[in-house]
Image (cartoon, rainbow, N blue to C red):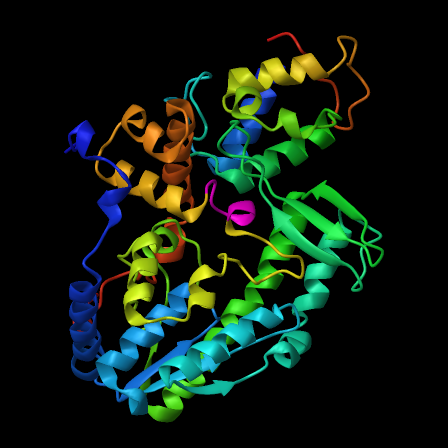
């Protein structure tokens, strides 16, 4: 599954309770759309730490990095090695979207 | 509607304390004796400014025979709290009762559960340590409001670690036992004497959900919930609250380590938060507010954003139970 699709799926399944999100654009702010609050962000961070083995510094915890699908994709790509394909614990992901 | 720019200053929060006090005394009498049909009021007094003002207002409204102050210390309470509460009681002629709730909290596992949660991120933490939870700076950056825990070893060494979601929820859920146990005690005395329970939030706390659901958020009346904390201080001066209490810095008095309200919840000191909240409520632009609160317009914009975000996140705390279907014989607003 492409990285963007995987991240979008996580957001939908965990914070939109599986509802269709056709009206939700990849650049839409999760906060402004009311999809995430601070505890949801913590849940997202835990997911990113485990799924992509990203070690967060406090300065990484910013809406600039996490507050839309596209921002998530950019952030994950910047922190995951370009040759990352088989080391994750849930199968392969494609970093190209 | 925006106020003219020249109107906004710190003076917008000045009140006629005598008139406000008289008005609130009448309302407390009406609410307690008529609408709630109760004989008096129970107030938990912490030695802080809000509970002190509520106690003084209720005494003037109902007389000392109809007001009971409860002091409810626990293991993490600052000794200052009991000291200031006693000072208030002596100064106002307030009847009081002390109930130490530490035993109840120990039995409920409050401290143990909290400490277990902290150990998920700081494994060396023990009951001999002290702790508090803190937020990152919300004014000078756009960081998410994700809590960290700060612990101090018996040797005085401090360690800080960002809380994971399960650790954060564990700390909050355990700590909330304190406010809910205090409220249980308040309602015990209310039932015992056929009294009402007075809550003590000021407007900033009420608006921003700075309370525990079914803990300090529960009450039969909240006499000062519409007043900005700055205005509560003005009432305190008028009502003759002891100077030591008026000068005491606001504190949460919830964690073993001293914790200011700015570390725990609000991005600014209460006086600047009040002005920002007032300005936002009256549609003022950040540029009009910034010079009055000694911030940049960008910083005021961030504070506005925090106010909105916190209102949204804490809406749940204000909700009444949601019925699947209305019961028309029992109206929502009795």
Residue at 21 percent of width and 85 percent of height: B37
Q: Residue at x 45, y 66 (%)?
A: B245
Q: Is residue B212 visible?
A: no
Magenta residue check for B248: no
Vertical placement of residue B302 versus B24, above or below: above
Q: Does residue B57 lie above or below A82 as drawn?
A: below
Q: Position of residue B206 (x, y in %)?
A: 35, 55
Residue at the image position 50 percent from the left and 73 percent from the top:
B84
Query: Looking at the image, how many numbered discs can be counted on the residues?
Result: 0
Q: Which residues are magenta?
A: B262-268
Q: Where is residue B319 shown, x and y percent of the image?
A: 34, 57
* Quadrant of the image occupied by residue B328: bottom left
**Quadrant of residue B176 within the rendered picture:** bottom right
Report the side of B140 relative to B148 (left or right): left
From the top left corner, tell me how far across and down residue A22 is, in percent.
39, 22
Residue A44 visible, this orientation? yes
Q: Quadrant of the C terminus of chain B?
A: bottom left
From the viewer's side, name the closer residue of A15 and B75.
Answer: B75
Position of residue B274 relative to residue B131, above or below, is above
Q: Is residue A46 above or below residue B40?
A: above
When asked about the image quadrant of residue A71, the answer is: top right
Q: Is residue B217 left or right of residue B324?
A: right
Q: Quadrant of the N terminus of chain B?
A: top left
């Amino acid at each position: 599954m492409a990285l963007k699709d995987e991240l979008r799926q996580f957001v939908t399944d965990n914070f939109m309770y599986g509802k269709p999100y056709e009206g939700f654009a990849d650049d839409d702010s999760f906060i402004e759309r009311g999809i995430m609050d601070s505890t949801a962000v913590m849940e997202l961070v835990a997911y990113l730490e485990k799924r992509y083995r990203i070690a967060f510094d406090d300065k990484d915890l910013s809406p600039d990095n996490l507050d839309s699908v596209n921002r998530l994709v950019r952030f994950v790509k910047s922190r995951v090695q370009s040759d990352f394909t088989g080391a994750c614990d849930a199968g392969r992901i494609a970093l190209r979207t | 509607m925006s106020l003219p720019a020249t109107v906004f200053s710190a003076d917008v929060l000045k009140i006629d304390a005598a008139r406000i006090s008289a008005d609130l005394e009448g309302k407390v009498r009406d609410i307690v004796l008529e609408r709630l049909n109760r004989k008096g009021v129970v107030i938990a007094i912490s030695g802080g400014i809000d509970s002190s003002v509520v106690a003084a207002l209720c005494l003037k409204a109902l007389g000392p025979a109809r007001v009971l102050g409860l002091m409810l210390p626990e293991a993490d309470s600052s000794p200052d709290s009991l000291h200031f509460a006693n000072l208030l009681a002596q100064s106002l002629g307030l009847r009081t009762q002390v109930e130490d709730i530490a035993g109840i909290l120990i039995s409920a596992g409050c401290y143990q559960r909290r400490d277990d949660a902290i150990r998920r991120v700081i494994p060396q933490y023990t009951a001999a340590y002290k702790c508090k939870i803190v937020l990152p700076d919300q004014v000078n950056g756009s960081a998410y409001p994700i809590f960290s825990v700060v612990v101090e070893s018996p040797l005085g060494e401090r360690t800080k670690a960002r809380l994971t979601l399960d650790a954060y929820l564990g700390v909050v859920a355990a700590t909330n036992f304190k406010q809910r146990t205090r409220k249980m005690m308040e309602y015990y005395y209310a039932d015992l004497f056929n009294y009402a329970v007075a809550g003590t939030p000021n407007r900033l706390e009420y608006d921003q959900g700075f309370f525990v659901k079914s803990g300090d958020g529960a009450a039969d009346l909240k006499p000062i919930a519409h007043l900005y904390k700055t205005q509560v201080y003005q009432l305190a001066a008028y009502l003759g609250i002891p100077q030591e209490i008026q000068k005491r810095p606001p504190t949460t008095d919830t964690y073993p380590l001293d914790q200011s309200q700015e570390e725990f919840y609000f991005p600014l000191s209460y006086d600047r938060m009040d002005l920002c909240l007032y300005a936002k409520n009256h549609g003022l632009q950040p540029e009009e507010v910034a010079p009055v609160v000694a911030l940049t317009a960008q910083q005021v914009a961030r504070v506005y954003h925090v106010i909105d975000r916190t209102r949204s996140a804490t809406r749940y705390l204000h909700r009444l139970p949601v019925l699947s279907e209305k019961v028309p014989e029992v109206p929502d607003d009795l």
